[in-house]
Amino acid sequence: MTNPPPPGNWGPPQPGPQQPYGQGQPPYGPPGQWPQQPGWGPPPPPPKNNSLKWLLIGVAVLLVIAITVGATLLFTRDGGGDPPTATGNTPAAGDIASANDTGPVSIITEDPTCEPWRPIISTLAKQERQGWEARPYDVPASAWTPDQRRMFEAVADAMRQAADQTVALAKLTPHRVMRELYEQSIAYWRAYADSIPRYIERDNFLAGVATDTSGALVAICDAIAQGSAGSRGPLVETSEARQNSSSLGTPDSPQPFMEASGNPVCAEWKRISDNFDRDGEPWRDADPNIPASEWDAQRRTIMYDVVPVMKALAKDLSVLGTKSDNPVLADFSDLAAQYWLAFAAAIPSYTAADSHLSAVAAYSTYAVFNACAAAIGG
């Protein structure tokens, strides 16, 4: 186990007991300190190994996540009317706005669901901060004390309420991959809540996936609000459209995207994630708050050296998405790839706001990682 890094470092330590899936490698992701707006703060680095403290912080600290996106609605609505779909059509009442979004996943520069997403995730986080963040994740329900049971049940109820409210956003967003992130947040929140009566340690991975998908949504919205998506997105070549995009599904009752038996790409996904943890360590240990204009020679070397590493990771993730034969997994792999590439492209003129791009990439990567663990065990 490593000691905690100084505040502001990219990668957290691995506190607490480690679980076998991905054991021994530190997670990677967004910085611990980002530019903040009053009353809001950054999301923590997303969990990979399901190390409990990072998993629980990943959800609980969403209370103070920087999701200051009030202007987003101004970008996406015309006179307060219904938001357009990705193809420019206005959906009829009750329709799914992303129905016509069958194109490639790309950097998202506007979305009408960011502002209504904030109070939903904030309300859930407030409940999770009432003890759940220090929960005994390795204790089965059969051994809970009455107080522990009440705490787990209260959070389960809050997750169900958040899931129910998020259904409308899954229908409202014009972006297919945003819809999928909302749907999987719904699915894994409900799956975790349903596990509570007979909870065992493995069910903790379900909360991990929900942390990842909801964290990716927050980071996407923050990249929009802070301008990094708009300024860096044009620098990234859009991936090719896949032949089979995910079906519209049922936002009211989505199912977990990972097959019950896992997916053939899970082992390879773990391998390339572990490789990136190793190869990206110097970048992860650097202070993310220093802009490119203030880098010394050593820092500049570190940042430029990680560019080919991120590009290789992006390529590998996209390939695994294709091999998975799972449309949602493929979209998450493309989302991660696009945002890793956007962050890499930002490095020559890097500012702290660009860290939101790596946050999207990391959370999207972890969503698949933890979904594999939830399906096949830690």
Image (spheres, helix red, strand yellow):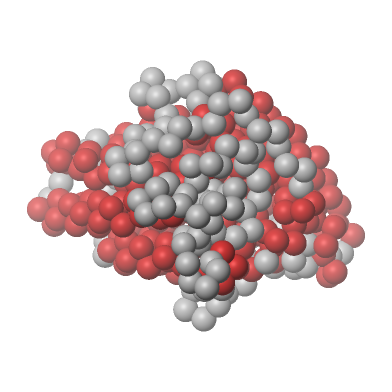
Position above or below: 358 against 43: above
Viewer-side residue, 165 vs 311: 165
- Say which quadrant the C terminus sits in: top left
Residue 71 quadrant: bottom right
Viewer-side residue, 280 vs 164: 164
- Residue 184 point in image, percent of width and height: 40, 42
Residue 297 in view (yes/no) = yes
- Residue 172 point in image, percent of width and height: 44, 54
Viewer-side residue, 275 vs 350: 350
- Residue 48 point in image, percent of width and height: 50, 41
Q: Give the side of residue 122 with respect to residue 39, left or right.
A: left
Q: How many marks?
A: 0
Q: Give the side of residue 28 with respect to residue 310, left or right.
A: left
Q: Residue at x 20, y 54 (%)?
A: 157
Viewer-side residue, 39 vs 235: 235
Residue 211 in view (yes/no) = no
Q: Give the side of residue 87 with respect to residue 57, left or right.
A: right
Q: Residue at x 38, y 27 (%)?
A: 375
Residue 24 quadrant: top right
